[in-house]
Amino acid sequence: QVQLVESGGGLVQAGGSLRLSCAASGGTFSSNAMGWFRQAPGKEREFVVAISWNSGLILYADSVKGRFTISRDNAKNTMYLQMNSLKSEDTAVYYCAIASGRYGTTRPNDYNYWGQGTQVTVSS
């Protein structure tokens, strides 16, 4: 059974940093793209960033470009999201996901497996 577990969320002041982790188990996902999405209260789930199977192609949402950095360690079945210069509008539940293909997309429907999410709250 595939399981994704996010960690690293929390409360941080604006301008601060957090590092999220996503540990995958129940399979090997080195051939799959992975991604991060987020959902703020009252809003739809939105794409944040995706990384291809070999880390060769990364897609960032414009809202996080230059502030967030995604990485993955296939040997550990783990993905990371380094978030710097956080803003209040980054407040959301962050979800990691595994895509069905090698290259990530911005579409949630292209992802087969999802974690339960981790809360990130940025105070202004």
Image (cartoon, grey):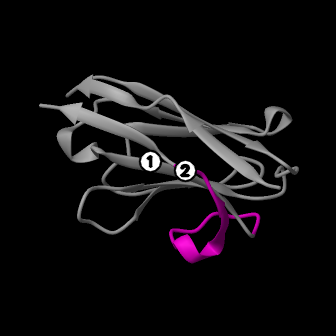
The amino acid at mark 1 is Tyr
Q: Is disc 1 placed on a helix, strand or loop? A: strand
Mark 1 or mark 2: which comes first in sequence? Answer: 1
Kindly report the distance in space between the C-alpha atoms of the residues bearing marks 1 and 2: 9 Å
Left or right of 91 in this view: 36: right
Q: Which mark is residue 108?
A: none
Left or right of 82 in this view: 79: right
Residue 6 image point, x, y percent: 57, 39
Q: Is residue 113 above or below residue 6?
A: below
Residue 117 image point, x, y percent: 49, 47
Badge 2 density bin: few <14, some 14–19, many ≥20, Cα 10 Å: few
Q: Quadrant of the C terminus?
A: top left
Report the residue at 30% width, 27% height from top: 11
- Looking at the rendering, the stretch of residues picked out in magenta corresponds to 101-116
11 within the magenta span:
no
86 or 3: nearer the viewer: 3
Q: Is disc 2 placed on a helix, strand or loop? A: loop
Residue 56 image point, x, y percent: 70, 50
106 within the magenta span:
yes
Give the labeled residue for mark 2. 116
Q: Quadrant of the N terminus?
A: bottom right
Q: Which mark is residue 94?
A: 1
96 or 63: nearer the viewer: 96
Q: Residue furthest left?
A: 124
Report the residue at 78% width, 39% height from top: 77
Report the residue at 58% width, 77% height from top: 109
